[in-house]
Image: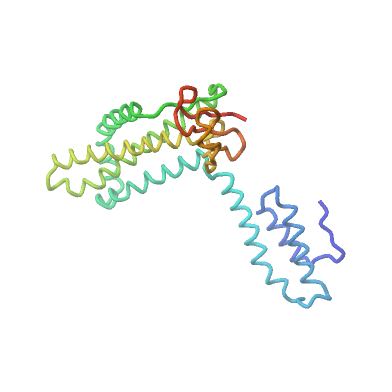
Amino acid sequence: MNHSLPTPLPVLDRLLLRAVSHITPVSERADWFRCWHAELWHRRHPYSDRVHGAIDLYPGLLSDAVWLRVECWRRATTGTAVLCLAVLASMSLIAMLPLLALFSRVELTIAFLSTQMPRLVIEASLTTVVGFALASRPVESSTPFEGLRFMKAKLFHASKLVLVQIIAYELSLALTQPFHSVHALAMVIVQAQLFTLLALLGLRWNFLDQDARCRHCLRTLASPSRVGRPSWNFLESNGTHLTCPDGHGLLSIPEIETSWRQNSEWIAQ
């Protein structure tokens, strides 16, 4: 790739451009290089009234490259399954901090949580059964949802379910454990009820979040857009469409349930 101009830039400028250009995304690197090459050349030009101002561009040059890289990462990770699991895992660590402060040592905190594992398994199993019993109807799909994509979706759903249960249990322990010495039996009952409430709320969010994701890439669907008019309820489609940011399909949600359209439908593209 040739970026030559009538008058070559000083060695420092060229080295800086080449080094910083590797920070920018590959798809935008050529345009970024040409733009900043032209700006530096203009500042260094003998007939420019700002001959000594090229160094002032160095911070802006670097910050622009970093911003492009961060923006590229943001577009690539926003709404993805990996980001969702990372946030839930971080929340589970944060929820454990009150217990760590209560026991003062990591070893004691881990030992205490280990003793609570049987109760967690039993209570989480019961709340999971209740959560699935209260779940809404599954989303219909115009194409088969099987194979590797099916396994990835189920694994993602199960991972969220486990993390949500862990977060709910840690929060219930953090809120009741400081009062355990006052009345142990009462706090055990309160902790179980609090965990059930938090876990059911988390499971409800899990189902809603799973329904609002692309069936192909598991990415969060874009903002909803209205389709049709209320007068079309019995003749044409009327409701809301949520599209995949990567163009894999759209989720069609009807305004009202009818005999020919009772629930949402995923339409692959």
Left or right: 269 as drawn, with respect to 11: left
Q: x, y percentage for residue 118? A: 26, 31
Numbered circles on residues, count? 0
Q: Which residue is at the front of the view, 268 or 81? A: 268
Q: x, y percentage for residue 137? A: 42, 26
Residue, x 54% and y 29% (percent of image)?
A: 266
Residue, x 76% and y 71% (percent of image)?
A: 43
Left or right: 145 as drawn, with respect to 17: left
Q: Residue furthest bottom?
A: 49
Residue 200: quadrant of the picture? top left
Q: Quadrant of the C terminus?
A: top right
Q: Which residue is at the front of the view, 135 or 232? A: 232
Left or right: 191 as drawn, with respect to 93: left
Residue 9: quadrant of the picture? bottom right
Q: x, y percentage for residue 150? A: 51, 25
Q: x, y percentage for residue 222? A: 54, 42
Q: Which residue is at the front of the view, 100 or 231? A: 231
